[in-house]
Every structure is written in C-alpha cells, then in structure tokens.
Image (cartoon, coloured by chain):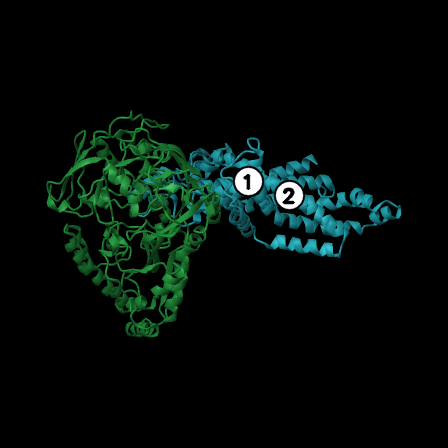
Amino acid sequence: MASVYDRFLKQRLSRRRLLAGAGGAAMGTAGLVLLGCGDGGGNGGNGGNGGVTPIAGTPTEASLPRSGGTLTFGSTTSTVFGVDPQTEIALGLLIFPRVYGYLIHQNPRDDTVFFDQAANLETPTESEYIFTIRDDVRYQAVTFPDQPDVGARNVEARDVVATIRRLLANPLVSLPKTLFTEILEEPEARDPRTVYMQTRMPYVYTFEGLGSIFSVIIPEELTDLNVVENLNFGGVGSGPYIVESVNGQEEIRIRKNPDYFRKPVPYVDNMVFRVIPDTGTIEANFRSQAIDAFSPSDALQAERVAQFTSGGHEAIVTESPNLAYVSFGMDVTQPPFNNIKAREAISLAIDREELIEKITFGTGAILGPVNQHLRDGFWALPEDELRRAYGMDLPKEERLQKARDLMIEAGVEGANIELKYPQLTNISAAAVLVQQQLQAVGFQVSLVGESLILWFIQTLRQGNFHATLHAHLPYETPNIPTRYFHSKGVPSTESWHHYANPDVDALIERHWGEFDENVRRATLLELQRLILAEHGPMLNLYTGKNRAAYWSYLKDWKRELPGSMQQYVYDNWLDT
Amino acid sequence: MQTYILRRVLNLIPVLFLISLGVFVLLRLVPADLAEIHAGLYGTEQDIEQLREQFGLDKPMLVTLAWPWEGEFAWPWEGKFWHTQYFEWLGSALQGDLGESAFPNKPQGVTAELLDRLPVTAELLILTLIFTIAFGIPIGIISAVWQNSPVDYLMRGGSILGLSVPAFWLATLVILIPSLIWSYAPPLGYVAFFDDPWANLRQFVPPALILSAGSAAVVMRLARSSLLEVLRNDYIRTARAKGLRERTVLFRHALKNSLIPVLTILSLQVATLLGGTVIIELVFDLRGIGLLTFLAILQRDYPVVQGVALYIAFIFVIVNLTVDIAYAWLDPRIRYG
C-alpha cells in the first residue's frame, strides 16, 4: 500500500469504534440544512467540524442500549425527487444513507477513511485503488413493486461498477460528476469481491467522491435507468434499514433490517420522517412529543425549545458549526466588477460583523475562501489575517472612507449593482443588509429576489447575474469551495462568475495532487491569499451554526461526527 | 327556467376552456421549464434536452402550424394541429386524467392525488361553513334586533376584528399557545371522522374555527344590514300593526326574506374559503388540496398546479352556476331579465 494513504486509512470503522465513537446524531444535518435549517447559508449545512456545544439540557447516556421503539423525526421540508440516492436533494438525504451501503466514508474532520462495506483497500500507486468487499454483506430480503428481485444475495463488485455507470448515464444526478467524468477511469470488477479503480491523475479528493453521501452501492439489477423513478419509492439496499413506505410529501417510514451485517445495530425498530412544513407546528409537535427530534430553524427557536420539559424528560438542544456559508458573487466581466479597485471597495463596504450579528444572532463567524469550520480551521486562513484583508482592523468610518476613495480611483462612484438572491429567510435579510451597506458608500443597489429553484437554474447555473448572494451547500472539503474560483468553475466546464486567472487555476490544480496534507495546506493558504488579493469573483461573507433538538429519552443522539458522517451511524436508541 | 339553466350551462364551456388555456399558458410564462429544474445545478445541455423530450416539452405548446410553402401543410382536422402540449393535456383532462406530477416523489397521478386529498379539504370547508352559519347569522340577527345598543357595537366590533385578523396569524397562535401552556398539539396525520371522531374533530375544529372567523364576520354584517332593511319594509309594519308578536314578525316574516342575499354570499364564500385553506392546511399540517397547492407552487410542479387551478376554477364556476340558478328560482325577475 502506498504510504501516502496510510494516514487516510489509519482508522477503520470497527463495530466497537462505531458504537463507541459514533453518534446517530442529527438526522437533520445534510438534508435539513440543505433545506433551510441552520443559519450559515440559506441552504443550511451539515454539522460542522468544530465540535458540538449543548446549549441546553444534559446529554446523558445510559450504559446499555435498548432495542425497539419508533423514532419520529420532524422536517419542514419534503423530498424533492424521493429516496433515489443519486438524485434526491432534500429529505431523502436522511433516508437513503440508512438504506444503502457504501464502500467507504471519509470523515471531513481529519480526512480519515472508514470502511463500511469494503473490507480492504490496496493502493499500488497514487492513482490505483483496489477495494475488496466484505463477504458478509447481503442485500435486504425485500422486493419493491416494478423492480426486479435481487434475491438477498451478497453485495458484489459488479454492483459498484453498475452504480457508477448509472450515475454517469443519469441526467438527474444531484452532485458534480467531475470525479466520475474527468478523474476516474471506468471501474472494473475483477472478481465478485474486488473492484479496481484508476484515476487519470493523482487526486486527493477521490475518497471524498467515493465516500460522499451520494455514493451508495445499488444492486446491479436496479441500475437500469428505466427503473430510475421506482427508486424514488424505495429500493433494495444493504444498509441497516429497509424502506417501508414513501410518501415524500407526507411521511417516510423505514424499519430495521434484521439481517444487517453490523449487529447489534440498529437498535431503533422503526424510524418515521414526518414532513411538517410550518416551523411553529413542528415546534408544537415537538413540545407534545409527537416528534422526538427536529432541527430548529434559527437561534430564537432553539432558545425557546431549550426550555421545554415534559413527562420527566427535558429537551436537549445542541449547536454545531455550519459547513454551509454565504457569499457575494460578481460577474467580473461587467462593470464595476471588472475593476479590482471596485471589488476591493465592495469588500470593504460590506460589514461582515453586522451580518453576523443580525442574521446569525451573533453566533456566526467571518469567512475566507475556505470555511474555517472545515477541519477545525486547518485549511483556512487565520481570522486576524482575514480581518486585515477585509479592513476589519480599521475603525468603521475609516474603512468606509477607504472604500469611497477606491471607488473614486476606479471611477465607479454611484455605479449600479443588480443584486440577485435566493429567497430564503436568512439570505433575503442578508441581501437587504448588503444593499444598505453598499449604498452607504455610494453604490446604487437594486435587489432581485428569486425562488431557490429559479436562482439555481436560471441565475447561478447560467452565470446570469450582475451580482448575487450565494447560499452555499455544506461542502466537506476545500474541493468545491476552491473550484468556485477556477476558470472552469464547479462543473469543470465554465466559471459561473466568468472569472479566469491562470495563477489561481494553477494553484487549485496543484493541490489536487498533493497528498502530503501540510504541503496541500500551504498551497491552499497561498491560493486563498491570492484570492483575497483579487477581491473576487466571490467574497465569502459569513458562516453560522447548525442546531438540533431532541428529547432526553433519545440516547446516543450525539453530534461528535461532522458533516455527512452523522448519517452513517445507527446506534441511537430510545430509553422510554 | 330550463332554457335559462341550459343557457347558463352552455356558457360554462367557453369559460372553462379559457380558464384551462389561461392556466396552461401563464404557468409556461414562468421562467425555467421542468427539464431545467430537474437537471439541477450540474445538468448539462444534453441532459436538459433529454429531459425535455422525456417530459414532452419538445412538442409545440399550443398549436402546430404547417404552412403550404413549407411543404408539410395539414389542415387542423388532419390531426397534426392537435399534437401539442396543451391539447394533449386538455384531452386527458377531459377524460379525468390530469397527468402525472413532474416530481416523482408523489406516488400517484394528479387526479388520484386530488381525490385523495379531497376529503380533508371538503371536511374543513363543511365545518367552516357550519361555523360560519352558526356564528354569523345569529350574531347578525342579534346585532340587528338590538341596533345601536352596546350589544350591537360589541358584535360589530367583533366582526371587524374577525375580518381584520389574518387567519395565518391566528392559526399560529392557536398552535403555539396550547403547545406552550399544556404541551398540546393537534394529532398528526389525517384521521377519518368515522375511524376516530374525537381525533378527527381535534384536528379539524380549530382550523375550521379560524377559517370561519373572516367569513362569519362577512355573513354577520350582511345578515344584520339585510335584516335591518327588511325590518323597515311596509309588510313588516303591517305585521306589527296586526298585533303579531315581535318574535313572530322577526322569524316568520323578516328573517326568511333577509337571508336571500346571505345565502348568496355563503355560496360565494365557498370559493373564497378554498383559497384560504392553503395557509390553514399548511399551519395545521392537514394534507388537503391547499397544502398540495402550496408545495406544488414551491416546487414549480406545473402539472399539479395546473390540475389544482383547473379544479378550483371548476368548483368556482359550478358554485356560481348554482347561485345563479338558485337566485333565478328565488327571484323569477332574474331569468326574464
């Protein structure tokens, strides 16, 4: 095994480790924040890497987990497509990781790789990966309507190959396909338990892609795209839970898989994901214990919920740093953004502290090009450096005057800015604040609010904006956040900001091949300093907190694991 | 009378046709088509084209025109003219099939979805109407009988409050206050009345009461003014002069006549209440047509929005027709007008 991988593979997900260290943790994370819980980005965010702070209640763990019971989770958002693991972008994100299996997971806190259904990985070179699949993992003994019978057979290498083929052919896939289209050669099933993969170049984010929440293993029989819609109502997986019923706008039920290979988990017999679109109603139902856990929509609701007690139980509310964040994006081919001094003036004029105070109720943090909540800030620039770069070390009037002077030098006094934004509560409020802040130095800012879907489709994807507030998804590595500054952008085809800087491109591409994390960190810091000096095309503004609320009878509902790792553990149990 | 009804029914055909056309075209004026929405942030142009074909969006929207000089001329009746998104949808709709949701997270077609949710919305509407009548008419009568008394002022003030307070605000309070004081929330999920009447009423009575606040206020004010007007008529004076008891004058002679406009407004309230159910169903987590509409609009699920809009328009038109017929039956001058 190549030594560069040793540090990645130093931890495996043994049963003991899984049971001891992993928390069932918030079902609410990826999906829910994606859907508007948490205040980092309007789009929410996974539980961050910086640890969890209980803001109320004392999480106590009884010594012996008890099996049984039904856990009901409340969500304000329904599914968009269903529970198809390759297409769903909302509530279904909480379901399919519990139904399907993965080869590996990668912990974004320290990049370590945990083995799920892979028993072993060999890396003869930096570009080759040979996975051996466990011999005791079987598909669930169920069949869904209009789907072929999988026959409760063992998970095999051909399933991994077929899953990736389906992903490449599927036009609805919700994740960037870059790893699979540009980096990875077609995988090969060498025998029933061995999958061979080769990347076209050494690529440090291979594990991120293979271990992402979307990279489940689907049985080959179900990978025909003709049954693509059927997977939205359930499919046979090899995970700890079996889909029982899916009504994506109302309620999804899953039940324990009695043949799950990692016994004795899961403990909870049934899980119900209940869609309750109104935040007040969800709170009332939590109060009456009709639901056992949910993600408070903001700090005020979290504070209120934290006071709840009922039937000898107390509500526990936890807060964790958010991986989602908010940015101010510019089309750098259009005036005034094609002038670097104008971009600097904008960066100085935006009062990030005011945004944090008013949008996240003081719980947020300022942000450089890479979110400091990633890996406890290992990849991010120090905060004092960011403060200097944003002029936050200067008195406010001096900072604003400097912005005005820069505008005069750039000849953009009174320039018009059309600022688009997705109409999510926090983002809409941030847009108004940014408008006021930019007008205070003399820009004329008009706001254009758009529904989230339209903003994604018509504004962001088509690069159809003068300026826009970005509601970012909860990225788990610096990969996507830095790709925003690449001339080929996030989808590896074009920059949505029409930005191209060969020096920036070179640094981004260089870090893709740097397996020594200290070397990679140095490159990433250099890249971020260059991006800060460019004052664009995207000014990252702030990131916030992610919150979870649950009753004290729900045990091992921990928040230690960051990001999508929270979805992959199943040892929570009900002490009722 | 029969001719009048026939004429009114025939008038419905162009109205419904225009509504269907309006709904269909307006929804397509909204930026971003279904294929673009499904392709998401990372879909390629090729993906979008593939999805357009899959959803039938590559077909012409309204009509297929082929001109002689293009070499493929065909008369409308030769068939090609109708092979468009609109006429295919309309053809299916006429056969009771409103199509499939654009998002595969719904387990059934739009028609089945509407029929599934109809009992929830219908029960909510029926209860609301019952409360509207139960509160609106008696309070209107009391207010008219004791005109300009403190009771009248109190009732009128209450009706203004009922009209002014937004239903969504009242609904939020009704959800939150019992939750904070008694840890109470209405049961989740629809429970049919015949399965568990108590659970069903706990689900439906609070939202119906809230929804009826506004409509009861309208009915109360109309009942009051209508009764006051009738009470000033000569035949009422005559009845009183004959020595009839005031109760007889009021209930036997005045009330019946004063309720004609009230009945009309009650019928029209049905249509208004259909719109009001959207927010109430959202807040009370009732899986009715209102909530379906709300979520479909958020998701840009055009087939569902189209289906619901057509359905609501249909109800509205039928209610209007019923009112027209009822009016003509009650007041023969109308059909000869």
Give the label on residue A21, or none: none
Looking at the image, which residue sits at the far right? Answer: B242
Q: What residue is shown at x 24% (from left), y 46% (from top)?
A: A107
Residue farthest to the front, as pictured: A63
Q: CA distance from mark 1 to mark 2?
A: 15 Å
In the image, which disc is placed on residue B131? 2
> Which residue was labeled with disc 1?
B203
The local secondary structure at tag 2 comes to: helix
For image coordinates 48% across by 41% down, the residue present is B292
Q: Vertical placement of B132 versus A414: above or below?
A: above
Residue A205 locus on image (x, y percent): 20, 47
Q: Given this view, does label 1 or label 2 mark the residue nearer the observer?
A: 1
- x and y, in percent, of residue B197 in the image: 58, 34
Residue type marked 1 = Gln
Q: Which chain is green?
A: A
Which of these two is toward me, B229 or A119? Answer: A119
Q: Quadrant of residue A564?
A: top left
- Name the residue nearer the viewer: A446 or A189: A189
Residue A161 location in percent, x, y?
A: 21, 34
Indicate the quadrant where residue A498 lies: bottom left
What secondary structure is marked by label 1? helix
Left or right, residue A378 beside residue A450: left
What is the letter of the cyan chain?
A: B
Count of labels in the image: 2
**Which image quarter: residue A100?**
top left
> What amino acid type should be assigned to the residue bearing mark 2?
Phe
